[in-house]
Amino acid sequence: MTRVLVVDDSIFMRRVISDAINRESDMEVCGTASSGEEVLAKVRELKPDVVTLDIEMPRKNGLIALKELMSEAPTPAVMFSTLTSIGADATVLALEIGAVDFACKPEAITGESLSAIFQELIPKIRAASRAKFRPAPVRPAPVVRTPRTEMRAPTSQKTLLIASSTGGPKALMTLFESLPKNMTVPCVIVQHMPAGFTKSLAERLDRIGAFKVREANQEDALEPGVALMAPGGKHLELVNATKILLNDGPDRNGVKPCADYTFESAAKYIGANVLGVILTGMGRDGTAGALALKKAGATIFGESDQTCVVYGMPKAAKEAGATDGEFPIDQMGAAITAALSGGRRASA
């Protein structure tokens, strides 16, 4: 039984979240708190398996409470955030600090919107309870690092494709900080996130300096040294070897953006000159696309079970025979650098 601590300054939200959790046969609410000031004491007293934590609270907000939680009593946390630019920035920072995942609060509370919240929240609580939880060091912002090695010029023009989901923002931060500064290949990132949140993540990754990172726009072109992030709520496909198209088609694999769309189109137009990377995440997204890329002669790396928050997407690709090697996230940058420079590291 998964024991959940619910933290929200709204008594109404505490009640409806608690009711939704208690309806599940495999979880129960072990306690509630109305402010960030109560979180640490409640966690120490109740020892929950998961904490749901509202970001926007008076006095001590969810970010401050999360930092204290990660430092003093590390516990898997699922954040609640509003669909605003400020909420998106705070959410991305929360994921970097160590939150496992987040769910979106609607601007207007209706029966329909509450139902949508719980359809999103309950599976994320369940996943958080099963995740391999590793709190990140608390830091105010990504640090631009001097690269330990310089990339040699690729033997041919490669394109780097990255897919990630649960645990992905923190994994992407770690990966980009371990890559050489000013990478020279085009890159596309597909991170499962709602509309409005991918822009904030792209901005944080851009500050690291490995790539110039930005959210993709319609009919953008792939450029050396630029990483385009698929916008939340849009699929990203290649329509030739350099040009992308964003489409608003139905979810695939239950997600939008879907990495399979991106990978499959890259297999068609770029083929062997792709290095695909599948990072932490639930489900099987990326597997079909990785198989298509593999058939076209591309190289595929997966994040190893050792560091995945959820070893789902890389595991599915590995079991399908689509990956050439697996690496812990802190070794993935070196593996990518070697592969893009003409070599290929053996699986760790």
Image: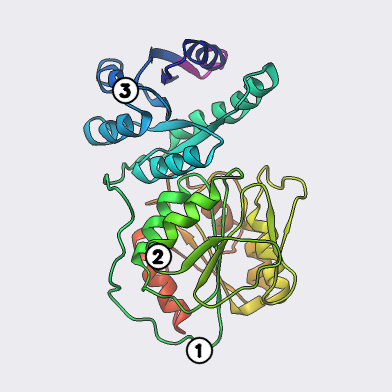
Q: Where is residue 160 in the image (x, y as percent from the top left)?
A: 54, 70
Q: In the picture shown, does residue 336 fall above or below 13?
A: below
Tell whether position 225 is magenta. no
Q: Do the residues labelled 3 and 1 touch (CB within 8 Å)?
A: no
Which region of the structure is painted magenta? Answer: 21-28
**Residue topped by disc 2:** 332
Say whether residue 140 is left or right of residue 34.
Answer: left
> Which image quadrant is residue 50 in?
top left
**Residue topped by disc 3:** 59
The secondary element bearing badge 1 is classed as loop
Task: Give the mark, 3 or 1, whose residue is nearer the N terminus.
Answer: 3
Indicate the quadrant containing the N terminus: top left, top right, bottom left or bottom right. Answer: top left
Task: Answer whether residue 2 is visible to the viewer in this image.
Answer: yes
Question: As drawn, which residue projects farthest toward the right?
Answer: 249
Q: In the picture shown, does residue 25 fall above or below 155?
A: above
Three-letter code for the amino acid on which mark 2 is drawn: Met
Q: In the picture shown, does residue 300 fall above or below 128?
A: below
Q: Residues within 10 Å of mark 1 (few under 14, many from 20)?
A: few
Cα separation, mark 1 vs mark 2, equals 20 Å
Asked whether 245 or 258 is in front, the reply is 245
Q: Where is residue 305 in the image (x, y as percent from the top left)?
A: 42, 51
